[in-house]
Image: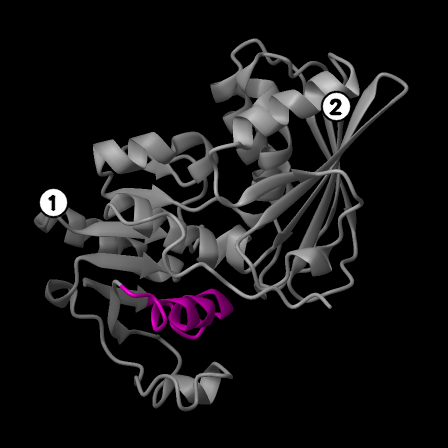
């Protein structure tokens, strides 16, 4: 069993992590800390009544081998803990230190899976939900140096994390990863915001220059994601309800007027955050990628 601590226990991300981890076959949550809450977790995080009897408590670093950090104020604590114990691992979800971190791994499993499995990184940064949806839409192109011109994005910022969305930070995150994958990419990232209709779903409409016909592009995407367990290319139109309460990303592709239009949908709290973090944990500890993530979709 993996002994786990969670900071920022009052946040929605932490609540979603607890819901996942108490049903994970290889996870044991030892403590959940918070600077603002006390008493039973179930009082704050609905649905845990009868499932989890944990109280909010102080972090005890020596009791765990993995920390999910959901609180930017606790990031220095995690840094100090890693410095003292090189076997401790931290999965950073708070975005408290921004995107670029020396000595850390970017937690987009669809590009860094083998490094997480073999290199055993101590500190992994989880992508923002918005960057996750956009990057999964363009990674196969960037991997083949087929990412030309600007990346134009329309995304619904549903703000399910109860914080201010930093569009410039998201742009920089997408641009940094795109250039890391494709050193020839010289375009810009343009993001247009629209209101989201749900509290969890995130839909990103991405437009880039089409460098091939639609059948060739679909073959490229299907080949890239063939051995990945959570990202799928589909022929029908996709919407957020198709992925709500799952760790999946669905991609729909179309070419029109020499432009490739990609619709990418994820559950912002799962694939865009807590679910992806559990996926990272599974890789770091040599577990099956889907352990604890075989979730029931809510669409009907």
Residue 102 at x, y percent in the picture = 31, 32
The N terminus: image quadrant: bottom left
Can see residue 118? yes
User: What residue range appears in magenta?
Assistant: 7-25
Q: Which mark is residue 6?
A: none
Q: Residue at x 27, y 45 (%)?
A: 284
Q: Residue at x 45, y 89 (%)?
A: 43
| CA–CA distance in space, label 1 to label 2 | 42 Å
Q: Residue most toward the top? A: 184
Q: Residue at x 43, y 39 (%)?
A: 109
Q: Which residue corresponds to mark 1?
A: 86
Around disc 2, counting alpha carbons within 10 Å, would you say few (fewer than 14), some (14 to 19), or many (20 or more)? many
Q: Which residue corresponds to mark 2?
A: 208
Mark nearer the N terminus (1 vs 2) = 1
Q: Is residue 121 above or below residue 219?
A: below
Residue 24 at x, y percent in the picture = 33, 66
Classify mark 1: helix, strand or loop: loop
Look at discs 1 and 2 and give the one toward the viewer.
2
Nearest to the observer: residue 101 or residue 219: 219
Q: Is residue 292 magenta?
A: no
Q: Is residue 49 above or below residue 20?
A: below
């Amino acid at each position: 069993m993996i002994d786990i601590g969670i900071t920022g226990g009052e946040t929605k991300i932490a609540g979603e992590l607890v819901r996942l981890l108490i049903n994970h076959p290889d996870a044991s949550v030892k403590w959940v800390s918070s600077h603002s809450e006390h008493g039973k977790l179930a009082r704050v995080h609905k649905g845990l009544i009868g499932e989890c009897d944990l109280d909010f408590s102080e972090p005890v670093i020596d009791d765990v081998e993995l920390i999910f950090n959901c609180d930017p104020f606790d990031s220095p604590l995690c840094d100090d803990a890693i410095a003292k114990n090189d076997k401790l691992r931290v999965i950073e979800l708070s975005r408290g230190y921004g995107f670029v971190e020396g000595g850390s791994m970017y937690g987009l499993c669809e590009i860094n899976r083998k490094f997480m499995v073999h290199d055993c990184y101590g500190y992994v940064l989880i992508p923002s939900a918005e960057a996750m949806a956009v990057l999964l839409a363009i990674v196969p192109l960037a991997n083949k140096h087929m990412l030309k011109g600007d990346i134009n994005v329309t995304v619904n910022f549903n703000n399910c994390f109860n914080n201010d969305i930093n569009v410039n930070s998201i742009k920089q995150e997408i641009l940094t990863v795109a250039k890391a994958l494709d050193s020839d990419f010289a375009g810009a990232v343009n993001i247009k915001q629209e209101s989201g209709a749900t509290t969890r779903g995130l839909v990103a409409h991405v437009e880039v220059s089409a460098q091939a016909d639609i059948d060739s592009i679909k073959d490229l995407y299907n080949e890239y994601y063939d051995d990945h367990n959570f990202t799928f290319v589909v022929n029908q139109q996709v919407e957020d309800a198709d992925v709500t309460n799952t760790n999946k990303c669905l991609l729909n592709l179309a070419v029109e007027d020499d432009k490739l239009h990609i619709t990418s949908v994820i559950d912002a709290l799962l694939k865009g955050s807590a679910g992806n973090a559990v996926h990272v944990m599974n890789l770091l500890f040599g577990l099956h990628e889907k352990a604890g993530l075989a979730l029931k979709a809510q669409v009907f």
